[in-house]
Image (cartoon, rainbow, N blue to C red):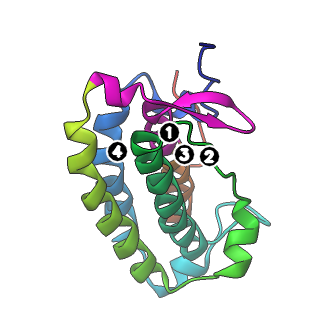
Amino acid sequence: MPAPAPNPYAAYLGGRDPRDLLADTPRRIASVVATFDAAAFGRSYAPGKWTARQLLVHLAQSEIMFQGRVRHALITPGFVVTPFEQNDLMALEPGPDGPTALACYEGLRRFLLPLVEALTPDQWDRTCTHPERGPITAGDILATMAGHERLHLQHLEIIAGRRDAVTVPA
């Protein structure tokens, strides 16, 4: 079987175990967002980019989509991932206010973590197919989730004034 395609967000994992990041990153995001006043949810990290509220809606939407992929990969032999266009999803469902989107994202993650912690090595390596990336595993999907949200954590930190730019961990 061919090797899984590279995770497009691998650099944001910083060499850490995705399981640890999946547990840690929502807490870090919540900590950053806790410093926001109402105006901060309307600010963007760069001209023409999503606002803090939109980033939180995107994280909640992505959590729904990625969790479905993981569960299907684990239970559906021959599962083929359905890609989605994030901007189309945002336009379809512009979403709630920032705190509500954050609560949704956090709740969905709390629901996922016991499954992640219980995965056997065989389940972590359960293969499915992504039309654009080729064969990937349930673990690859989880690692993509972890890296993806680490990138958006940096965007929220920029909005909060905690950093000046996005960096890729060395």
What's the amino acid at mark 2?
A: Val
> Going from the N terminus, do you reach mark 1 or mark 4 first?
4
Upstream in sequence: badge 3 or badge 2: 2
Foreground disc of the pair 2, 1: 2
Q: Which residues are magenta?
A: 121-147
Is residue 161 at all visible to an observer of this figure?
no
For image coordinates 40% across by 66% down, the residue present is 105
Marks 1 and 3 in Cβ contact (< 8 Å): no
Disc on the earlier residue, 2 or 1 = 2
Label 2 packing within 10 angstroms: few (<14), some (14-19), many (20+): many
* Amino acid on which the number 3 mark rests in the picture: His
Label 1: how many Cα within 10 Å (few below 14, some 14–19, many 20+): many
Look at mark 4 in the image and give the residue it sits on.
Answer: 22
The earlier-in-sequence mark between 1 and 3 is 1
Write down the residue under mark 3.
148
Which residue is drawn at the image coordinates 31% and 36% (left, top)? 19
**Whether label 2 touches label 1, CB < 8 Å:** yes
Q: Which residue is mark 1?
A: 141
Q: Which mark is residue 81?
A: 2
Q: Secondary structure at mark 3?
A: helix
Amino acid bearing label 1: Ile
Q: Going by the image, does 123 lie left or right of 127?
A: left
Q: Position of residue 64 (x, y in %)?
A: 48, 63
How many angstroms separate mark 3 from mark 4 (CA)? 10 Å
The x and y percentages for residue 5 are: 64, 24
The quarter of the picture where residue 101 lies is bottom left
Please check the rendered image and state whether residue 30 is part of the magenta-colored stretch, yes or no: no
Q: Is residue 136 above or below residue 62?
A: above
